[in-house]
């Protein structure tokens, strides 16, 4: 569980999406696009990551809680 990219972030897929959105916004030099990245992060955290974490805690208990204590949600 704590190998590879999962040693750095508990949600590497969402981190990659956020970085991709940042790259696209920077490529097209759109300030509104850059402003949408934090909104994306807030939305994903509230409506996708937190529910997933509740399910994982219910499934794996203390083992996942220890992982959460050692690895940050985003970076």
Image (cartoon, rainbow, N blue to C red):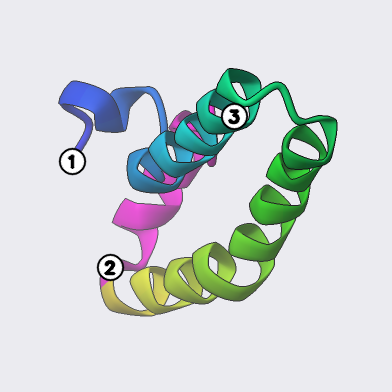
Counting from the top left corner in percent of width and height, residue 60 is at 27, 68
Q: In this image, 18 relative to 43: left or right?
A: left
Residue underneath mark 1: 1
Please give the range of residues in magenta.
Answer: 60-75
Q: Does residue 65 belong to the magenta stretch?
A: yes
Q: CA distance from mark 2 to mark 3?
A: 33 Å
Say which quarter of the image contains residue 6. Answer: top left
Q: Are marks 2 and 3 in contact (CB under 8 Å)?
A: no
Q: Main secondary structure of the magenta part?
A: helix
Tell me the quarter of the picture where residue 61 sits.
bottom left
Looking at marks 2 and 1 on the same chain, the residue that comes earlier in the sequence is marked by 1
Q: Nearer the viewer, mark 2 or mark 3?
A: 3
- Disc assigned to residue 22: 3
Q: Is residue 56 left or right of residue 36?
A: left
- Of callouts 2 and 3, the N-terminal one: 3
Give the position of the N terminus as an image quadrant. top left
Q: Position of residue 18 (x, y in %)?
A: 53, 39
The secondary element bearing badge 1 is classed as: loop
Res 21 quadrant in image: top right
Query: Which numbered tag is attached to residue 60?
Result: 2
Residue drawn at point x = 40 percent, y = 45 percent: 11
Q: Position of residue 62 (x, y in %)?
A: 37, 59
Q: Which secondary structure lies at badge 2?
A: helix
Q: Residue furthest front?
A: 28
**Residue 69 or residue 28, whichever sits in front:** 28
Can residue 66 be found in the magenta stretch? yes
């Amino acid at each position: 569980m704590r190998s590879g990219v999962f040693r750095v972030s508990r949600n590497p897929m969402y981190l990659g999406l956020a970085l991709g959105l940042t790259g696209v916004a920077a490529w097209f030099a759109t300030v509104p696009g850059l402003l949408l990245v934090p909104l994306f992060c807030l939305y994903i955290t509230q409506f996708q990551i937190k529910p997933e974490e509740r399910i994982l805690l219910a499934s794996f208990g203390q083992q996942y809680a220890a992982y959460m204590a050692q690895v940050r949600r985003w970076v």
